[in-house]
Image (cartoon, helix red, strand yellow):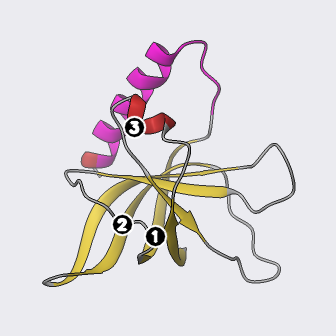
Amino acid sequence: MKLVGTIVPGLRQARELGYPTVNLSYELPAGTTLAHGVFVGTVTWDGEEGEESHLAAIVVGGNFRDDNPPKCEAYILDWSGDLYGRSVEFAIGELVRPLAHFDSLEALTAQIAADIEVIRGR
């Protein structure tokens, strides 16, 4: 599935763990749903020297506070920069794992590192 939208500020929690993400503001077509989980994907945008596309860990998860669409964020592997306000495309591929809750930040950080290694291998 492909989602196109604008990069918006998030809570910056993943950044504090060493895995800064970009958060996509998007609208799903009526009747469309997204599975929740961690996925292999790519993030694409128009860069200064043409189109850029990078491998990413894409996370789709529900918003527990209200009925808004699930949030969608990506950790772009081997890239850093600022995409706030830019139009981007998230191409969501194969499921790496379903979402899970972790007992500690250390366990979450270890799982993120493992997810990234799986994504690099695909």
**Which contiguous range is marked in magenta?**
100-119
Q: Name which residue lies at 39% across and 21% down.
A: 110
Q: Name which residue lies at 40% across and 28% down.
A: 17
Sequence order check: which comes first, mark 3 or mark 1?
3
**Residue designated by label 1:** 90
**Which quadrant does the N terminus fall into?**
bottom right
Q: Secondary structure at mark 2?
A: loop
Amino acid beneath label 1: Phe
Q: Which mark is residue 42?
A: none
Local packing at callout 3 (Cα closer than 10 Å; few below 14, some 14-19, many 20+) is few
Sequence order check: which comes first, mark 2 or mark 3?
3
Amino acid beneath label 2: Leu
Local packing at callout 2 (Cα closer than 10 Å; few below 14, some 14-19, many 20+) is some
**Residue designated by label 2:** 83
Residue 121 visible in the displayed image = no
Q: CA distance from mark 2 to mark 3?
A: 14 Å
Q: Nearer the viewer, residue 89 or 41?
A: 89
Q: CA distance from mark 3 to mark 1?
A: 19 Å
Q: Nearer the viewer, residue 34 or 108?
A: 108
Q: Nearer the viewer, residue 14 or 12?
A: 12
**The image quarter in which residue 22 lies:** bottom left
**The image quarter in which residue 40 lies:** bottom left
Of labels 2 and 1, the one closer to you: 2
In this view, 100 is above or below 105:
below
